[in-house]
Image (cartoon, rainbow, N blue to C red):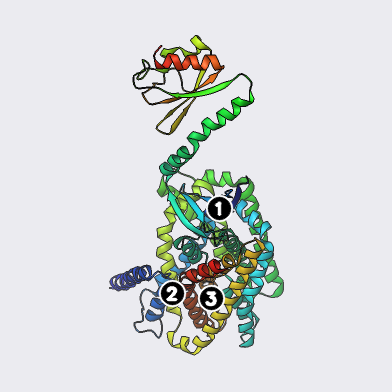
Amino acid sequence: MEVEQTALPGIGLRHEFTTRSGRRIGIVSHRTGRRDLVLYDPDDPDRACETIKLNDEEADALAELLGAPRIVQRLNALHSEVEGLVSLQFPITPGSPYAGRPMGDARVRTRTGASIVAVVREGQVFASPAPDFGLLGNDVVVVVGSPESTSAVSDILSGG
Amino acid sequence: MHTAILFLELGAVLLGLGILGALALKVGISPIPLYLIAGLAFGTGGILPLATSEEFTSVGAELGVILLLLTLGLEYNASELVTSLKGNARAGVVDLVLNAAPGAITALLLGWGPVAAIAMAGVTYATSSGITAKVLSDLGWIGNRETPVVLSLLVFEDLTMAVYLPILTAVLAGLSFASGAIAVAIALGTVSVVLLVALRYGRFIEAFVSSPNSEVLLLKVIGLALLVAGVAQQLQVSAAVGAFLVGIALSGELAEDAQELLTPIRDLFAAVFFVFFGLQTDPTKILPVAGLAVLLAVISMITKLLTGAYAARRAGIAKAGQARAGIALIPRGEFNIVIAGLAVAAGVHPDLGPLAAAYVLILAAFGPLAARVVQPFITAIAKRA
């Protein structure tokens, strides 16, 4: 997929690409920090038929919504290339002994050899969480390791 | 007593402009034509001639030109100018040839002479980047794929102005060919040096100008612009170009901050400038040239449409986008009046001022309206195709 970048003198930058189904999407990044999400008219591919203005916060939220599942997918793709290494994701049930405690308390790496590489909470990804990162019920943890060690982590976090 | 009358006149004029501006906002057109009309009404031969504040408005108008060009320069940085010069030179030259021709030929056909032809070429050439930028953002055309084409043509025009204005200044000053050539050489040299300095050493200028205090920043930027403008004027290079170059030399966050601070001051003095041009123009002289102005406006609308279509087609834009690029280029405004103002001040031809005023009145008002009215038609045509 090719993302085209065009300078808009006096305004900023525009990135655009065409989806596989033939729709064209663009992002205009204004120098002022404003972002416009632009959808092009299928009948007149040069015309922006929808322009949605986004402030910093909204742009971040949109990026996270679109990016969060992708990070997990990319991890899976990455690990399928390395033999014997899997990444597993599973939720922390509200009844888990570690819900509401710092992640370090579970001593996951010492006990199993697998690592928690990310925590997804309400669509937001916390990559490489530190041992003092507090786990909460309904968080989804992403674990990387051997098949045995990752399932051991699942057992520990769900009650062992 | 004198001060009281001065304040009364100025207050009435500015308040009137404010009300006209509100009206323009409501109708969705540029306020520039209304400011010009206000100037016509108050000037010589108008319904209510102003006497006392003429001196102030004349200085205010000069400041308006400096601030217009300074803020225009602030919008661009040097590397953007160079890239767009490289990538769009051919479309830029087509724009120059097609759109300078109607003005120059008109002046020659009317027997106004070569000096007036050079001035009129500038009047019909330059698209108003201010009005066009507003049209693009008002109609949601900024995301459109033909918009970079339009913007880079505007950049090219502004750069051309940096070369054209010194030439015009030299010609208007009636310099001999030799000293005119020297003035132009100085101008070109200055433009190149400033671009080079801005590209290589821009951060030193920025380090000198920048300040966390907005008051200090404002004073430094305006001071620097006026100083350079004064030096440029002294060298017969045109004060406006000096201010434009200062704007280009400043870039990044500093330029954004400066622009934000300068915009209200520029709006005030730019309004004064348009009024002043109107003041100098006798409205009774407009009627005889009105037909000519309409004809010239129609011709240069067509030439801009052709320019837009050509430039957009080169960029691989489809028919509808080509038409939009042309329409976006139609508005004329500040630059054209700046050029006409220089020519009027030099007394080139008594009809030049009225013709330019009527011409800009038509295109500054009609350009944005055309874009608004034509948009649905273009979409319909594109849908059918």
Mark 3 packing: few (<14 Cα in 10 Å), some, or many (20+)? many
Other residues around mark 2 within 10 Å, as few (<14) / some (14–19) / many (≥20): many
Q: Do the residues bearing badges 1 and 2 touch, measured as CB atoms within 8 Å?
A: no
What residue type is disc 2 on? Pro
The local secondary structure at tag 3 comes to: helix
Answer with left or right where residue B120 lies relative to residue B257.
right
Q: Quick one: quadrant of the N terminus of chain B?
A: bottom left
Residue type, numbered disc 3: Ala
Residue bearing mark 2: B33
Q: Is mark 2 on a helix, strand or loop?
A: helix
Query: In the image as oriented, which residue stretches furthest toward the right?
Result: B178
Q: What subunit carries mark 1?
A: A
Q: Is residue B226 visible to us here?
A: no
The answer to whether B234 appears left or right of B86 in the picture is left
Q: In this view, does B340 lie to the left or right of B260?
A: right
Q: Name the residue under label 3.
A: B340
- Name the residue tied to disc 1: A24
How far apart in space, not on screen, are marks 2 and 3 (Cα)? 15 Å
Q: Residue at x 41, y 60 (%)?
A: B265
Compared to A33, does B136 lie above or below? Answer: below
Give above or below for B269 relative to B275: above
